[in-house]
Amino acid sequence: MSEPYQTKPGVKIPSHESSLPKRFYKAVDVVALDESFAVHLDGRPVKSPAKRTLALPTRALAELVASEWEAQGERINAPAMPATRLCFVALDLIPDARSATVAEVTKYASTDLVCFRAPEPPELTASQAAAWDPVLAWAEDSLGAHFVAATGLMPIHQDPVALQRVMQRAGELDDWRLTTLAHVTAVCGSALLALQLLDGEIDGEQAFALSTLDEHFQISQWGEDHEAADRLARLRTELVTMGEVLRALDAAPAA
């Protein structure tokens, strides 16, 4: 852990780590409730920001969240706990914002990342077609949603029926999966990639690779700086964890 930077004797600028809350617990446990599973810290249940008990639908999801709390060091770094943050949102926000969340996912679909193709160079356009055309084919086969791709940044008027299919699919989900779908959609800039992850068509690593194809092409041409590397690492962690969340939700909720 880095120490506060001292500009001159007696004057210190706090480090990022020193601004984080201290770890206040030793033991992390998963406790079975009547129909859910709670994460306990030293015997006390974790509470959401709205003071709700963090009660999760499967033991696998509770164990995933518990592993994030267990992994914390002397300080609690909430940004490094994506599964926990997602579950807080699912508990505190989504029940009263389902319609708005479904509408936001549908809005992303209307300007979906995989539908916007670069006019050049040829290497990038070929890579985009090879990676993203199968996503559009999957949407048509699995959702009955026909999306079209276009070159450049001009708006694409997608088929309203296709958007309705996305809206219907999102609206059918429970709060946990809808929260995950919405988060992955925002991270990827693609509702279609998020739906593929939800359905197990791709995993978190593949979602990361498909959604950052342009960035990795630029890196191959010009190299990578530390800021870009840090951003990509955070995106990868988020998407891999969201894939783990979905697998945990699909696991049997056995005690």
Image: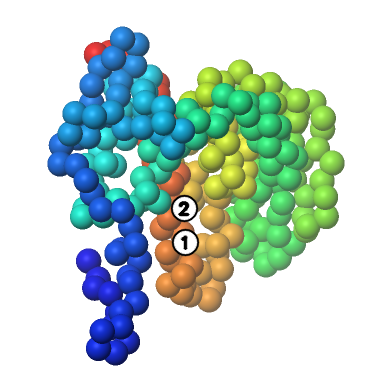
Label 1 neighbourhood size at 10 Å, few (<14), some (14-19), many (20+)? Answer: few
Left/right placement of residue 101 relative to residue 34 reads right
Is 22 situated above or below 173?
below
Q: Name which residue lies at 57% across and 47% down.
A: 188
Amino acid beneath label 1: Arg
Q: Position of residue 177 (x, y in %)?
A: 50, 26
Using the rendered view, name the quadrant where residue 29 is placed.
top left
252 is higher (above) or lower (below) than 15: above
Q: Quadrant of the N terminus?
A: bottom left
Q: Which mark is residue 188?
A: none
Judged from this view, the residue extending furthest toward the front is: 10
Q: Which residue occupies the foreground of this view, 239 or 46?
A: 46
**Residue 62 location, quadrant:** top left
Determine the residue positioned at 31% across, 53% down: 21
Three-letter amino acid code at disc 2? Leu
- Residue 6 location (% of width, % of height): 28, 83
Residue 223 can be seen in this image: yes
What residue sits right under mark 2 in the picture? Answer: 235
Residue visible at 82% across and 46% down in the picture: 156
Q: Position of residue 99 (x, y in %)?
A: 68, 26
Give the residue pinned by disc 1.
Answer: 231
Residue extending farthest to the top is 34
20 sits to left or right of 211 = left
